[in-house]
Amino acid sequence: MHDNKCCSDFQSAVDEYLIRHRSVLDILTKYQEASARVNRAIAKAVTGCGCIQVSASRQSVPENITYSELRNHMSSHLIGEPCPQCQEVIAKELGHSMFYLAALCNLTGISLHSVMQQEYKNVKTLGFFHLS
């Protein structure tokens, strides 16, 4: 019940305080911009701060493993963890992205909590096959 109240309170606050960008086109482009800013914040943690590194290469997957074992052999390609300052910036940008996600939910009459519940059910039901 608490999660639903958190989501509905957040959605209500977004609806109340979103004044200038109420057009679906404004919200779609702001959501895309917010997502790009999340990407930029992570990139700056790598290139500006250096608290995390990206070491990307082809995923090395042994032969004859089960799909459930695959997770143990996949890399995030990240080395380290964001420092407190970079975590703060990344979290701020994620928050802006969530703001515009909630605004899209408001415009379309969709409950953010319902979306999260349905996606959770899909993940739990489909497990490994959810986004493959």
Image (cartoon, rainbow, N blue to C red):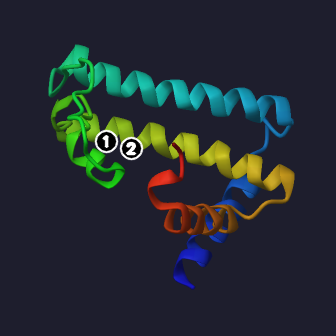
Q: What type is the residue that disc 1 sits on? A: Glu
Please report the residue visible at 56 percent of the width from the left and 71 percent of the height from the top: 6
Left or right: 123, with 111 as reference point: left
Residue lying at the far bottom in this picture: please name it.
1
Seen from the viewer's position, the closer of residues 1 and 57 is 57
Which part of the image, by quadrant, shows the N terminus? bottom right
State the image coordinates of residue 25 (x, y, percent, origin top left). Answer: 83, 29
Numbered mark located on residue 88 in the image = 1
Mark 2 — residue?
Answer: 91
Q: What type is the residue that disc 2 sits on? A: Ala
Numbered mark located on residue 27 in the image = none
Left or right: 101, with 42 as reference point: right
State the image coordinates of residue 83 (x, y, percent, origin top left). Answer: 17, 37
**From the viewer's perspective, is residue 108 above or below residue 32?**
below
Number of marks drawn: 2
Give residue 126's quadrant in the image: bottom right
Please report the residue visible at 67 percent of the width from the left and 30 percent of the height from the top: 30
State the image coordinates of residue 2 (x, y, percent, origin top left). Answer: 53, 82
Label 2 with label 1: CB-CB less than 8 Å: yes
Residue neighbourhood size for the residue with mark 1, other residues' Cα within 10 Å, grouped as few (<14), some (14–19), many (≥20): few
Please report the residue visible at 75 percent of the width from the left and 35 percent of the height from the top: 27
